[in-house]
Image: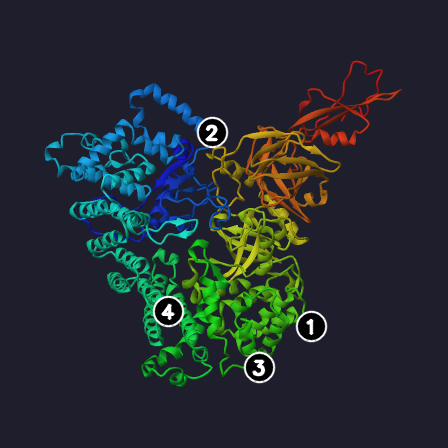
Amino acid sequence: MQILWDLRKELRCAVLVDPSSDKKDMGKQVQKDPLSDTRTIAKQVIELFATGGPENQNTVLLLQDNEHLRDHLQDFLIREITEQKISAKFPVVIILQCIRSASIIDDEEDESRTEADLLLKSRLSDKEKTSFVSKEKLIQRHHRDEMGKFHGFDIMQHNYNEEYIRKTFCSKEGKKITEYLQQNKVSRNTKLFAFLALVNSYVPGSYLLQSQCEAFLSHQDPFGVNLSFEKRMQPFSDVIVTFSRHGGEDKRVRIAHPVLAHQCVQLLADAGIARSSATLDFLQYLTRQQIQPSLLLFFKDMLTKRETTSNGQEIFSRLILDMEKREGIPQCANVLKTASETFKHDPFYPQSLARFYYIKMSDFTRAEIWAEKAKERVPTNSFIADTLGQVHKNHLYKQVNGKSGEKSGTRDILFWAEKAIKAFKQEEELAERESVNHMEGDSPTKMYHTFNNRGIFGYLQVANIVYNSLTNLNPKWRKLLTQEISAEHLSILSEDRKLMKYQTFITSLRGAVERKFYCFFESYLTYSEPRNWKDQTPYFQRDIVDCFRKYSTAPSPKEDLPLKTLKEEMASTFPGLSSLNPNANLSKITELWKIINKENPDDVNTACNYILANILQTNGPVASPEPTTLPQLRAILQKFMEKENTKLWTPEFYLLVLLLFWPEEAREGDVTNDIDLNKYVECMKQAFDNKYKKYLQSRELVPLFYLGKGAGLKRLVHKSSIDNICVHLKTGKSRTLNKTRGSGEIRHTCIQDHLLRVNGVVRVHKAFARMANKEIEICPQKQASVWKDGNISFYLGFNISGPVAFDIKYTMHTVGSGTNVQKQRDDAIRSERTRMEESKTFNRGIPMGFKTSSHIHTPTLLTEPELKNIHPQLTKTHYRLQCPHAGLFQCMLTGLVFLMERKGEVLYRTVQWDDSLLHSTGRTPAGPLFSIECPQGSVRQLHLPHCEIPSGKGFDSLSVVHVTGDSVEILQPVRVTDSHAVVDITDLCLWGLAYPYWQFSLKGQVLLFHKPQLRKPTLNVHLLPVNVPVTEVEKLQRACKYIQIPSNCLLTCGEIYKLCCDSAEKNKIQPSVQ
């Protein structure tokens, strides 16, 4: 909130809170889709941006204080910007996402966090501690008599120390509260205090409305209505605060601080008011009063929301866990049961109760009853239906392991397994219906539905338990379960004739397991992964593969030998091939697919698998002795492309079309010249929508291949190659070096060395790749990164939905040669003045501290640390700058400034500009070219010294030049200060500054070097731009002594300068003018 207040004059600041209304409601549970208002919110944000007309538009700084909308609001905003045809030259909206949590995970290895995440923890920095001391003196000066009432301030000043809170209640005022609680346990203000303490302790950001608090108190003392709320709440008033988010609305009431609230809950418990009794009183209040809908949500969170900690998700809410620890299991069950009976339409309370019965009490009978009731309340919700399957699965597990008293026999195992399987199959059917309903209609929320895979996964878990338990009873069960022998042999394994009724169930297991693996999980796990790894349990993939292997060990009687071998290698499908272990025998696998393809030449899926195997083998560690060539593979594919039979075509087919026919440099007679790849990109998207979208829409699609620097099939870089690099780099590095995970964070030079940076263009928020004089539409990995029209560069990946652009930068590239380079150069020169105006407009209204470069995906707030000047070590070839920690460090010799994200060593030197390379961009050097290295990868931003004057033309025309090999990027600076041009970087190599061939004035320096000689001493005078390091000139003047004088001056391009001295007739000046 302080950030919004500080920037309220520069930006249009707004706060997005929970969309639930605080209008009074007669105790009915509000069931509302958290995404239902998102589209309306997006419209309002864009309206705020556009208020005042085109000339008065300004960036909206939005604080998003609602965790339910965090993944979706950006997509709706982009949609609104596109639909309203807004073409802004500065950010439309900057989102600060605030996620409240009672348990903050501060883990450097947490892969769910990004570099943009900032953790605000209950811990003060040294600077903040000093500020609190100063503030305390000010408060003492103005509020000496009320110092003990500033609880929130005192808690923060004492670094959130709970021991300090306990001492607070030992004070005179604290003892009054303790005594009052012991003597007035059933008074209305005590009960209200207990309500506040509970909800504020266990639900971050919660509150009660003052009007409802006053109404509750009126039942105790109708004649006390003339007293103020603070008076009626004595002696608790000192620990309670009232506030209003908007002027004129009903005030809100809460305990002064959550830490204080938690201590109040314990104080109440010590006084005999237990958490369970306070919660039950709270329940009665909710049913008898007109209450705010948000309070219903707070209460539900208090009883049912499971916090995520560093060890994973808690099994129950924090209140239930604390209640169990301090009061016992029966009290927890009683509270959940009462809540379930009170809110007769809400499914989440009986769901939590069912889980509590089977997890904590092993009471599977009651668990089944309440799981059924939860299901009855919302019969179409697959996630609610999952609880019943989990009850039966856990009942089966305890029966098998003898935890229910004694080990079960075969019939009991099959009985409970069949019940669990039936429940999970019903859940799977509901999940399918949900996905169909969300995919149909015009509702925007259909895009973000999470497909529930728990029914399918639960089926495999139960099948696994059945396999393990039955084979432990009798190893011969393995042949029956894997169908090596028919179910007719069931009587041989057991004399129990009642087992015959399970014959159909037993014979169905293998086929069902294989279908669920091949038709769902294999592609699900290969083509996608969770956006947040904490949403997927560590055993998820392990259990799936384990179950599949157990049931598929025996070959089917109908399978040929090649297919049998491929299944053993788990290489019998396209997803299986795509996820092969790098050590797999690719040569053998390719040969087997060659045999199958010859036998089935008209089978499109067989052809696709054969082609993929060849691609993988060509790029594998061991090359094929007789590899199939690219033209041969294209010929196989073209046979099907000519059929125009779209029913045969799958996303996998289109993926291969793009991989094999993706153009290189234009060559006469190239077969790719006749292929309309835009058509196939669109067809691939439609095929993906039809086959996979409903299952994968909430997950991150994984790039299966990247476009590399090689030729032919060698330019296709498989994802396993990139993942292997990331694994090797991860040791001792930051979390950004984890597997690419589809996130596109391809930052390390070791990865970039394998990939080709592609040129492209953005038009109307759509991105296109420019390859061989063709433009092919691609999908940006981050939609916000294509916020304006212009030239871009990126790395190209291919996932199962189509080509994807990663690490998009707005730039004027000259990668390539010939006509392509000339076209880019012409485009760059024509757009130069427009780009300069955009730079001015883009930075309008954006305060210092914001990243405002057009190649940054989304502008983000940046608190710049204090600049520290360091004298570098000089070697024969390099400057060496030791940066002991994260921060901003300036080299005292070169003027270079490095923003370090952690400790690191920077090595740098000046190198010669390649005039021919830079000339192709229509630019000339504006300073030295620096070769920069940082072995630790710690540099995140460069400040390159420039020589421009703020009032001159060159100040706005400065560009940052990034040279890699034979290619050059021209980037727009993040910002330009009086002395430096700032650029965010993802890799190092060569960096410098340039500007167009224009004439303007610049800041210069006059350097004097005295060369002592016996007969004719010489004074060398150099006129140079101010950003040329003196140390570099000294290297060229080795026999001379540098004379330090006030050297700053103003130099103008094209002007003539003359050296004058009093004894000109005695000294020779050469040349006379310069």
In space, the residues marked 3 and 2 are separated at their CA atoms by 75 Å
Q: Secondary structure at mark 4?
A: helix
Residue that badge 4 annotates: 400
Q: How many C-alpha atoms fall within 10 Å of the one at disc 2: few (<14), some, or many (≥20)? A: few
In space, the residues marked 1 and 4 are separated at their CA atoms by 54 Å
> Label 2 amino acid?
Lys
In space, the residues marked 4 and 3 are separated at their CA atoms by 47 Å
Residue that badge 3 annotates: 599
Q: Which is nearer the N-term, disc 2 or disc 4?
A: 2
Q: Secondary structure at mark 1?
A: loop
> Label 1 amino acid?
Glu
Residue 202 in the image, given as x and y percentages of width and height: 31, 44
Residue that badge 1 annotates: 626
Q: Which is nearer the N-term, disc 2 or disc 1?
A: 2
- Residue drawn at x 41%, y 27% is 132
> Label 4 amino acid?
Val
Marks 1 and 4 in Cβ contact (< 8 Å)? no
